[in-house]
């Protein structure tokens, strides 16, 4: 992981990705310099189920605000809630997402939202990929070996990487999208390490 300091130039861009949750919130930060993408930090905020829902929301807001203060990201990306059958779970997740977005907006950050399927598609080329496949691809893209203890951290990292890919259309060329990973590699040999 990279430590912030004078080595980061003004041409660098930092993206904060959030995987919202009411018990575990994941966060991931990447820095982009030119075409190089580097892992800055990733982790989780573990919330106590003994706290009431409003205390947990306050802790989410404070953690996101602290990450923004510490890393000074240029943009903020968050996973959109998926539609499930349990209305109460959806409501709680929506609130967690809302306070994270509010913290970003309070800091005047651009907010982008991505569906879980879009994130998986962007990272692995398969919108139905599992969490392990996503993490393994992130390890290759960002050149790190350690497995995070919680997939919520790598999920949040995937949100940040997805935002970078979507913002910069790395999977597109002058004549359209890459058909598959082989086509992508052929069109982007500088991305292979």
Image: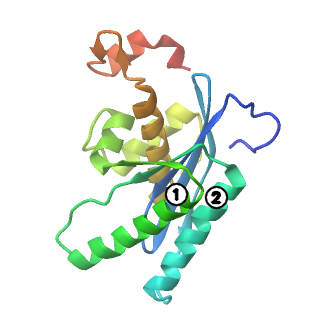
Which element is circle 1 on?
helix
Tag shown at residue 105 = 1
Looking at the picture, does residue 120 appear above or below residue 98? above
The outermost residue toward the left is 85
- Image quarter of residue 87: bottom left
Is residue 131 shown left or right of residue 127?
Answer: right
Look at the image and tell me whether residue 65 can be seen: yes
- Residue 186 drawn at (x, y percent): 39, 10
- Residue 82 drawn at (x, y percent): 26, 59
Is residue 44 shown left or right of residue 181?
Answer: right
Contact (Cβ within 8 Å) of mark 2 with mark 1? no
- Residue 80 drawn at (x, y percent): 34, 55
Q: CA distance from mark 2 to mark 1?
A: 13 Å
Nearer the N terminus, badge 2 or badge 1?
2
User: Split into 4 quadrants, where in the image is the N terminus?
Assistant: top right
Q: What residue did someone put label 2 on?
A: 67
Look at the image and tell me whether residue 148 can be seen: no
- Residue 119 drawn at (x, y percent): 35, 43
Please name which of the two marks, 2 or 1, marks the residue nearer to the observer: 1
The outermost residue toward the right is 6
Residue, x 50% and y 60% (percent of image)?
Answer: 26
Looking at the picture, does residue 115 appear above or below residue 44? above
Residue, x 75% and y 30% (percent of image)?
Answer: 9
Residue, x 31% and y 32% (percent of image)?
Answer: 125
**Residue 89 versus residue 100: which sits nearer the camera?**
100
- Image quarter of residue 183: top left
Which element is circle 2 on?
helix
């Amino acid at each position: 992981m990279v430590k912030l300091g004078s080595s980061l130039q003004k041409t660098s861009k930092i993206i904060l990705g959030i995987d919202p949750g009411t018990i575990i919130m994941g966060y991931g930060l990447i820095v982009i310099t030119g075409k190089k993408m580097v892992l800055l930090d990733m982790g989780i905020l573990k919330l106590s189920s003994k706290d009431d829902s409003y205390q947990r929301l306050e802790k989410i807001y404070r953690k996101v605000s602290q990450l923004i203060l510490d890393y000074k990201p240029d943009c903020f990306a968050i996973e959109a809630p998926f539609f499930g059958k349990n209305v109460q779970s959806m409501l709680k997740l929506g609130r967690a997402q809302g306070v994270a977005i509010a913290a970003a907006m309070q800091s005047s950050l651009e907010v982008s939202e991505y569906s879980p399927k879009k994130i998986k598609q962007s990272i692995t080329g398969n919108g139905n990929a599992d969490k392990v496949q996503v993490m393994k691809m992130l390890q290759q893209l960002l050149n790190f070996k350690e497995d995070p203890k919680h997939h919520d951290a790598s999920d949040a990292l995937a949100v940040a990487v997805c935002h970078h890919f979507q913002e910069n259309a790395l999977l597109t060329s002058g004549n359209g999208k890459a058909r598959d990973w082989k086509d992508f590699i052929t069109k982007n040999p500088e991305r292979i390490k």
